[in-house]
Image (cartoon, coloured by chain):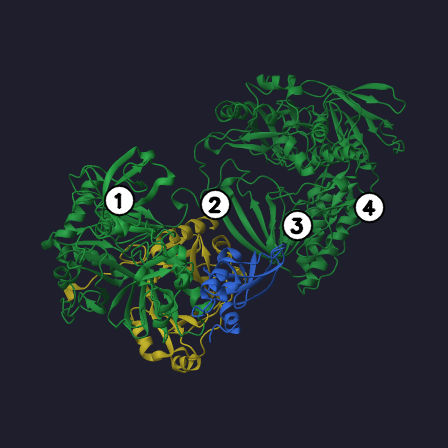
Amino acid sequence: MSQKSRLDGGLIDRSRPLSFSFDGKNYTGYAGDTLASALLANDVRLMGRSFKYHRPRGVFSAGSEEPNALVELRSSARREPNTRATVAELFDGLEASSQNRFPSLRFDALAFNDAFSSFLSAGFYYKTFMWPAAFWEKLYEPAIRRAAGLGRLYGKEDPDNYDKGFLHCDLLIIGSGPSGLATALTAGRAGAEVILAEEDFIFGGRLLAERNLLSEQDGSEWAATVISELQSLANVRLLSRTTVFGQYDHGIFGAVERVSDHLPEPISHKPRQVLWRIYAKRALLTAGATERPIAFENNDRPGIMLAGAMRAYANRWAATASQDIAIFTNNDDGHRTARDLSAQGVNIVALVDCRIDAPPSTEFEVLSGAQVVNSRGRLGLKSIQVQLRDGSMKELACGALGLAGGWNPNVHLTCHKRGRPIWNDKISAFVPATDTDPLLRAAGAAAGILSTHGALLSGAGKAIEALKELDISARTPILPKAEDAPVNIAPFWYVKGGKGRAWLDLQNDVTVKDIKLAHQEGFKSVEHVKRYTTLGMATDQGKTANIGALAVLAEMEGKTIPDVGTTIFRPPYTPVSIGAFAGGSRGKEFRPYRLTPSHKWAEEQGAVFVEAGNWLRAQWFPIEGESHWRQSVDREVIAVRKSVGICDVTTLGKIDVQGADAAEFLNHIYCNGFAKLPVGKTRYGLMLREDGFAMDDGTAARLAEDHFIVTTTTANAVPVFRHMEFCRQCLWPGLDVQLISTTEAWAQFAVAGPNARDLLQKIVDPTHDISNEGFPYMACGEITICGCLRARLFRISFSGELAYEIAVPTRYGDALIRRLMEAGKEFDVVPYGTEALGVLRIEKGHSAGNELNGQSTAAMLGMGRMVSQKKDSIGRVLTGRPHLLREDDYRLVGLKPVNAGDPILSGAHLMNVGEIANAANDQGWVTSAAYSPHIGASIALAFLKKGDQRLGEVIRIVSPIDNLEIEGEVTSPHFIDPEGERLRV
Amino acid sequence: MIINHPLLGPRDAQEFVYLGDASLIDRPDASGETALDDFHDYLYLRDNPAGSHKELWFHEQGDRSWLVVTRDTRTHEITHVELAFEYAKRRGRDK
Amino acid sequence: MSDQILTPLAALGDHSPRIEKIGSLTIEENPDLAITSIAVRHRRDKDLQTFLMPALGGELPSPGRSVFTSDVSTIWTGVGQWFLIASYAAHPDFAREIKSLIKDTASVTEQTDGWVVFDIIGNNLIPLMERLCNLNGKAMMAGDTTRCLIEHLGCLIICRESFRKFTILGPRSSAASLYHSLVKVAHNVA
């Protein structure tokens, strides 16, 4: 297919033709093209449909500010919606399709919205779909979403990988136009660590789109020379295809590098995109400026676009939207576009300049003091209606119209930390406020300096200024001679008097009338108008739209534009895909997991695993013939009670507490006393928060006068360590105590059941006496096993049985579980998982996370008397608050169903018999429940008002959401061995 | 944000865990007659300044130091960072 | 009782350490390290230095630094806190050795199996480092040591030789996740 609208010249490689398709039709472009430039070259002007009215739209810009030409790229799982055709680099085989149309771009059934546009004015959705409320979710919202959809997701997982990374530099330069290159050259030669980030795939910014010479060179040639010098400098890093999308506190910038977007698919192992977190000591915003349109009636037809974009297409890409073009301008830059197009052989039908004193031209007709008031052409511009200076009307046939309303500096990043731009009358635009942010400066067009000469000078100057603050001296390089045209502009935002719609926000379909209506309805603040009309809330964030709306609003308010103010720009500058933010953290790699030392062995046993925090723990160990988890769990529980079982308890937090004042320190952090704990003994400890509520519990074993090992629950290992360091560093810095977390260093197994000692005796070296007398309940000590392997033994029990916990260096954990299982064969030893662990502790009445949920006091847990009044411990004073000492407070109790077959569910609430089940009558709740093979029924732990005084009472256990309503008997929480005799044999 | 660690230099705030007002260091005397009221005020009453604020950050993914960071709550400007145990000692906590 | 002796596993769950070569990069698990932490007791700084001086041949390293000798490496890990690292084969009960050396001048804690250790060697590791963590790899000199996050895991990163050799200590229970990240990124930048 021929490229009908291809011109001569340009920065495209005609020796490398690329084929691509748009909406199923095949075209050819060249290397160096964007999808938009290739489509224009192929005479395709219609590229999309608008969001609300489904109006036919064509490409409007030549950069990332594009509001109209949103397309889907690629197919199947790589399909990516809402991509701007203006920044999509063409590659061979690219598949692109338009979106938001049905069934086709040329005939869109939903365009009937357009006919009803008078009903769809500002706030339409708010006003119309308010009632009945139930209709919103089921009817209105889905229908609106279908009609107003942007692109579609494919629904399958993205096959590409994304990564993130971290970069450091003295100076981050954002944008590589004339000011960016001058900055980079200045800083690079000075030896500073420099990062130059450019969103485009070629460096040079606006230099690539202009015909003005820099000294004797083309702008693009000069850019290439500078880049080649910068490439040779080890201290300069060039990042093309990289958008700096946000500025965060203290010199942190977010950037996304599109590593593989220009390839059909990434090279093996390479990421599609990388999200960079850049730490910059100083940064320079040299992101240029964005041209703005002038609004008039029916100004949204395909072919109507920014004049500067036309110039870029003609000069850089040798493409034009039409051979017959008109320009509508309020400033001298529109004339430059006309001159450039004319030089490229495009026929300038007329240059319509609203200024009476418009400069004349010998190359084309200048209509000064004139305005474009309307346009025709359903799927593409056919003609414009011009009101001449004398008031008469003239119809001009043309295929495209360029709008030149002046240039807005790209101030966005300077606003991300709440910087407010200020108005510059000379260029009729907002520029970054100076001196508000010492880290980020602006230079060149981004600072409102619109001539090439000015941009070069300001880039070098700002670089020197910034580097000086870092004690790096730099000199202005010899810069080329460049154009230094003054800005001549007459502010003009929209043509008044039209009856039809004049569009401001092309993507979200917001018109001049919408802004006026919003104002009439009382929305006067710019932030309110934005939200009410959705102005600037589309994916382009109104880069080409906002200023026009501000002007309309200012007029309505009788204020100036700076008095109306701008809305706040927030990151990201342009859309960033979710995949880039996720990086490698997705699927199984969503977060790192932690494996216990017996993991490999447990896998071999066919264990079922459960996530406990980041840990993967064996939940139960099914054996042949078991088809339901309860069968496995019941068997494991019974085996522990009857003989012996083994459970990996490595996950419990272990904190080494040493120092001359270690015991005193523990006295402060536990509510019960530790100072008098003898060496070689372990004690249960309850930690309170300062507010008197329980924080965590565990044991502390005293290995030496000055050495304890504190254990925490699995879930609280990290916060408890943090808390203990707070106590050590901030509250009692005078105590000689040191803390080290050793959770990972030891593999620890609970060996529990009547045969636990007999089993352990088979592996503990005979030099160590672990008899009941030699190593009684709560003893602890350092021993050796299996021929001199150092180990630690603790005689503690969570199950209520005779039990030990044995620890060896982690690397021996796998071998130890295998050895224990082998040695335990004669006792029919079983491994047990977290489910059985839970059942065993509920039977014993031990509290765990469900009870220690941050809302329970020591008294509620039945441990009120443990809170020592003889010492100052965290939480002791506020435990004494009257409300925490109330007689009718909740107390931990056990529950058994009256009918043994009834199940109890945790979360159920407790009600008195004969009372209505409502919040007012609530007596408490079930915290933990399990089927107890020992009792032969469901049992539970619960908090019950005055529970300790209600043993034997029958109470209703109610859970409306589970359809549960049964009767239960209040019991002691200790379902087995309340006297603790089993522990001591 | 970047916190300029007094020993390790500038570190990303991602490595830290925030606790709150540095007044948490001034834990009252638990044996005083007004202990109950003192602890109540200590735990629940905080200034909420729009401006300079001393606060506690824990370098959890670093050297496990608690730091007292002086930060402007309006601008996030950090004007001073010091090791909390030194700050605490200065306030007599090691007595 | 030699038949009783238990066989250790490397942190990645194999009997031998893992070595991966990707392009010019080598990622090597190093299980032969005995790691002991010491934390100085109050007002015993000088005594500790005196006891350790012969073994270290110098002072304990300052914040953010490590010192390597042929026998023992010392890494600053926190205020008044260091890791001492030696060959595990030569020092199977390193913590006890250290304890008897420095007595009660510091708290001594066995840390050997708390960590998985990867040595990363290559011609230029900067592209790898900048994908892994927020440290400025280019600026790291031999001996520079910082604890920071790699894919949510708190790791110690030690520069052994600028640009070319780094040692990473990560939490042992997450050895597999850390290894996965290292290998993935290595492929990514290879």
Q: Which residue is found at the position 63% from the left and 46% from the top?
A: A198
Q: Nearer the viewer, mark 1 or mark 4?
A: 1
Q: Colour of chain A?
A: green
Q: Identify the residue position indicated by label 1 in the image.
A: A929
Whether residue A579 sits left or right of residue A459 in the image: it is: left
- The residue closer to the viewer here, A454 or A121, is A121
Which of the two discs, 3 and 4, labels the residue nearer the N terminus?
3
Q: Which-is-in-front pick, marks 3 and 2?
A: 2
Label 1 close to label 2 by CB (< 8 Å):
no
Q: Are marks 3 and 4 on the same chain?
A: yes
* Residue kind at label 4, given as amino acid type: Asp
Mark 3, chain letter?
A
Q: Nearer the viewer, residue A590 or A9?
A: A590
| Spatial CA span between label 2 and label 4 | 45 Å
Please tell me whether mark 4 sits on a helix, a strand or a loop.
loop
| Residue at which label 3 appears | A227
Colour chain C appears in: yellow
Return the mark for residue A583. Answer: 2
- Along the line of sight, which residue is nearer the eye, C125 or A562? A562
Tell me the mark number nearer the camera, choosing from 2 and 4.
2
In front: label 1 or label 2: 1
The amino acid type found where label 1 is placed reads Ala
Q: Secondary structure at mark 2?
A: loop
